[in-house]
Image: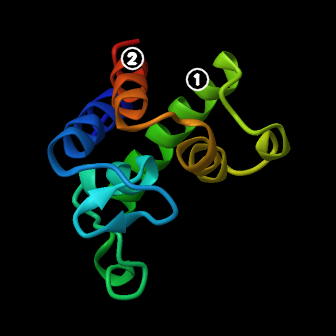
Amino acid sequence: MEPNEVLSKAADIIEGQGWTKGSYEVNGCYCAVGALYEAVGMGCSCDDEWNRWNDDDNNSVERASQVLADALKAKGRILEYTRNWSHHGIITGWNDNIATGPEEVINTLREVASK
C-alpha cells in the first residue's frame, strides 16, 4: 500500500473504532501508530502477530510513518526531545502527549494523506 492509502485507512479506523493513547490498541480503539499497523492488516499484538507480518506490510507502515513523522515535525507538533527518535517514537509522543483528541489525530492523518 502507498503511504497515503495507509494514512487514510488509519484515519477511518480511528474514526470508526475509537482512539486511545498509551497503547497501540485498547478494547478495539487505536492510537495513531496502532491504526497504521491495523490499516495494513498487521494487527497490534506484538507477541503473537510478529510471525505473520510480511515485509511488504511492514514497509508500507514504515513509509507511512515516515511521511507522518515528517509532517508533524514540519508543523512543530512534536515533543522536542523526540525530534531525533524513530518516526514511531515521534508519532507516539504526539499521539499520547500533544494531540488534543481523536479529531486532531483523524484530521492530521487525512491531511497528510491528501498531500
The residue lying at 38 percent from left, 46 percent from top is 60
Residue corresponding to mark 2? 111
| Three-letter code for the amino acid on which mark 1 is drawn | Ala
Along the horizontal axis of the image, is 87 left or right of 9?
Answer: right
The residue lying at 34 percent from left, 83 percent from top is 51
Instruction: Find residue 90 and report its horizontal and vertical position in percent.
Output: 66, 44
Instruction: Find residue 24 and report its horizontal and vertical position in percent.
Output: 42, 63
| Observer able to see residue 56 | no
Secondary structure beneath dot 2 equals helix
| Three-letter code for the amino acid on which mark 2 is drawn | Glu
Residue corresponding to mark 1? 71
Instruction: Find residue 4 and report its horizontal and vertical position in percent.
Output: 33, 27
- Reply above or below: 47 against 70: below
The quadrant holding residue 53 is bottom left
Q: Are marks 1 and 2 in contact (CB under 8 Å)?
A: yes
Give the residue at the far top of this rendering: 115
Task: State which quarter of the image contains the N terminus.
Answer: top left
Question: Is 41 in front, or is 81?
Answer: 81
| Observer able to see residue 53 | yes
Question: Is 16 in front, or is 45?
Answer: 16
Specify few, some or many for label 1: CA neighbours under 10 Å numbering under 14, 14-19, or 20 or more. Answer: some
The residue lying at 33 percent from left, 55 percent from top is 30
Q: Earlier in the sequence, mark 1 or mark 2?
A: 1
Specify few, some or many for label 2: CA neighbours under 10 Å numbering under 14, 14-19, or 20 or more. Answer: some
The residue lying at 57 percent from left, 44 percent from top is 91
